Image (cartoon, rainbow, N blue to C red):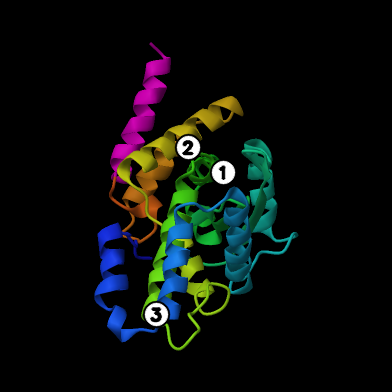
């Protein structure tokens, strides 16, 4: 799950330094999509999230309602609430050994059974709160804008004749993967951690699970998802929450 970083100058270089090699009509279409990426409306973001979530669900084994993982997540979810910024949350479990969880701007929250096997209910709640935080704080929308712009650049590279590749078909799978695998900046990760802490506090849930969740993640070897990245390191993230807990006791 590799991060994809968009640098405007690089994108411009792709568009204009190689313009002789591609169809101009296809380049203009792709360039227009890149411009739109910076100004995606909330409706656009929701529509793209709907497509991406459906794409991921279609390629994953989802725990049925009566499955033990689904029942456990339902219990955890009740404590966290049913909305993100007014958007209804749709929780599901993917049956896979992978340790992961993510959320999209349309309220699509997915938790992997591998993560649930590793963690207690309080820890899972803390991780979900973190992923919800990325949505609530606008980080997920920014990641989508970047992913959409990258798909536009690839449209330019594959333009032929009067047709450029479109997100709705050839790019959807890769676009979905880039959203699920999105990595965030150190400040965004810390902000999402603090959002989870505040959410757990508001919902009167135990915050200590955030500490132990990060401690467990710190013991894992590598991993491409942002929750496993070292920016900031999981141990430092646990320390941040410990300091917040300690500050309340003073």
User: Label 3's element?
Assistant: helix
Q: 54 or 47: which is nearer to us? A: 47
Observer-nearest residue: 226 or 143? 143
Report the number of numbered marks. 3
Q: Which residues are magenta?
A: 232-250
Rendering coords of residue 222 (x, y %)? 30, 60
**Residue plotted at (43% across, 32% down):** 194
Query: What's the distance in space between the residues labelled 2 and 1, CA to CA?
Result: 8 Å
Q: Residue at x 34, y 65 (%)?
A: 2
For disc 2, the neighbor class at 10 Å (few under 14, some 14 to 19, many from 20) is many
Q: Residues within 10 Å of mark 3 (few under 14, many from 20)?
A: some
Q: Earlier in the sequence, mark 3 or mark 1?
A: 3
Q: Quadrant of the N terminus?
A: bottom left
Quadrant occupied by the C terminus: top left
Can residue 88 be seen? yes
| Residue at the far right in the pictured view | 66
Residue for badge 2 = 209
Q: Which mark is residue 121?
A: 1
- Magenta stretch, main secondary structure class: helix
Quarter assignment of residue 63? bottom right
- Give the left or right position of residue 92, taking residue 3 as reference: right
């Amino acid at each position: 799950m590799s991060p994809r970083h968009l640098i405007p100058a690089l994108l411009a270089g792709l568009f204009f330094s190689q313009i002789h090699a591609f169809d101009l009509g296809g380049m203009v279409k792709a360039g227009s999509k890149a411009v739109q990426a910076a100004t995606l409306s909330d409706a656009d973001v929701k529509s793209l999230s709907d497509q991406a979530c459906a794409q991921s669900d279609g390629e994953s084994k989802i725990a049925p309602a009566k499955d033990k993982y689904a029942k456990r997540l339902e219990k955890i979810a009740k404590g966290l609430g049913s909305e993100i910024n007014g958007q209804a949350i749709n929780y599901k479990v993917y049956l896979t050994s992978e340790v992961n969880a993510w959320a999209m701007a349309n309220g699509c929250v997915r938790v992997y059974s591998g993560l649930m096997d590793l963690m207690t209910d309080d820890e899972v709640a803390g991780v979900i709160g973190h992923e919800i935080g990325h949505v609530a704080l606008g980080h997920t929308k920014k990641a989508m804008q970047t992913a959409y712009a990258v798909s536009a650049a690839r449209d330019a590279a594959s333009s032929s004749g009067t047709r450029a590749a479109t997100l709705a078909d050839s790019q959807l799978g890769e676009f979905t993967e880039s959203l699920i695998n999105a990595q965030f900046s150190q400040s965004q990760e810390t902000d999402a951690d603090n959002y989870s802490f505040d959410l757990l506090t508001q919902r009167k849930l135990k915050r200590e699970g955030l500490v132990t969740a990060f401690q467990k993640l710190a013991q894992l070897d590598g991993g491409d998802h942002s929750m496993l990245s070292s920016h900031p390191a999981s141990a430092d993230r646990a320390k941040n929450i410990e300091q917040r807990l300690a500050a309340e006791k003073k």
